[in-house]
Image (cartoon, rainbow, N blue to C red):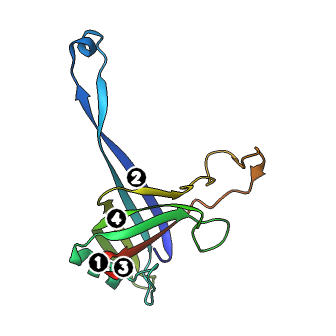
């Protein structure tokens, strides 16, 4: 998302519970995975000009009202650059479920958008491997690497644009 000031990605697992004679005798629950879901919430400064990777508020609203899933990719930025990693990311189809506009007098207009997955989310390349984590990052040889910005880079494209 263009000029994003924040992004949160949540991957959830829905579980079910099996009740068997053996499990109930031991008083332990036996769980299994029913499904996965992912949601993305992002906020940023509203753009007046755009391209395919940085849609304007109007373009986001058009995509939401069309109800058509959009192709989305996300990664993290490396260093001080504005572009996301190209070596690894995640990709999936998402539905825009919420879009807010906040325009206070004398301040930049801001947007908030929420998306929910519509099908499988796939790891591309290395995913977010090598990104900022608690503590120091290390390369394959165990050497310390410079930290990676935790800011997320997200882009959306409508299925009809493909």
Q: Which residue is mark 3?
A: 162
Q: Nearer the viewer, residue 130 or 80?
A: 130
Q: To which quarter of the image does residue 114 belong?
A: bottom left
Q: Secondary structure at mark 2?
A: strand
| Camera-side residue of 152 and 156 | 156
Circle nearer the N terminus (2, 3): 2
Label 3–label 1 contact, CB within 8 A: no
Rounded to the nearest whole Å, what is the CA distance between mark 4 and mark 1? Answer: 13 Å
Whole-angstrom CA distance, mark 4 to mark 3, is 13 Å
Q: Which residue is mark 2?
A: 10
Disc 2 versus disc 1: distance between alpha carbons? 22 Å
Q: Earlier in the sequence, mark 4 or mark 3?
A: 4
SS for callout 3: loop
**Nearest to viewer (mark 4 / mark 3):** 3
Asked if disc 4 and disc 3 are in contact, CB closer than 8 Å, the reply is: no
- Residue 79 position (above or below residue 157): above
Q: Position of residue 34 (x, y in %)?
A: 27, 40
**Location of residue 132 with respect to 21 vertically, above or below:** below
The residue that label 1 is drawn on is 63
Provide residue 126's location: percent of width, then percent of height.
57, 55
Determine which quarter of the picture holds residue 99: bottom left
Query: Mark 2 and 1 residues: CB-CB less than 8 Å, in contact?
Result: no
Quarter containing the C terminus: bottom left
| Residue at the disc numbered 4 | 93
Q: Earlier in the sequence, mark 2 or mark 4?
A: 2
Using residue 85 as the reference point, say whether residue 79 is left or right of it: right
């Amino acid at each position: 998302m263009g000029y994003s000031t924040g992004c949160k990605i949540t991957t959830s697992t829905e579980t079910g519970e099996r009740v068997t004679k053996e499990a109930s005798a031991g008083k332990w629950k036996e769980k299994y995975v029913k499904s996965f879901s992912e949601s993305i919430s992002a906020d940023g400064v509203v753009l007046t000009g755009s391209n395919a990777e940085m849609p304007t508020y109007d373009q986001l609203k058009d995509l939401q009202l069309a109800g058509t899933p959009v192709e989305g990719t996300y990664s993290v930025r490396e260093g001080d650059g504005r572009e996301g990693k190209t070596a690894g990311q995640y990709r999936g189809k998402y539905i825009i479920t919420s879009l807010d506009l906040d325009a206070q007098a004398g301040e930049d207009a801001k947007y908030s958008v929420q998306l929910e997955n519509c099908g499988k989310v796939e790891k591309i390349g290395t995913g977010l491997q090598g990104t900022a984590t608690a503590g120091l990052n290390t390369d394959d040889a165990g050497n310390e690497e410079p930290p990676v910005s935790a800011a997320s880079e997200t882009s959306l494209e409508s299925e009809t644009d493909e």
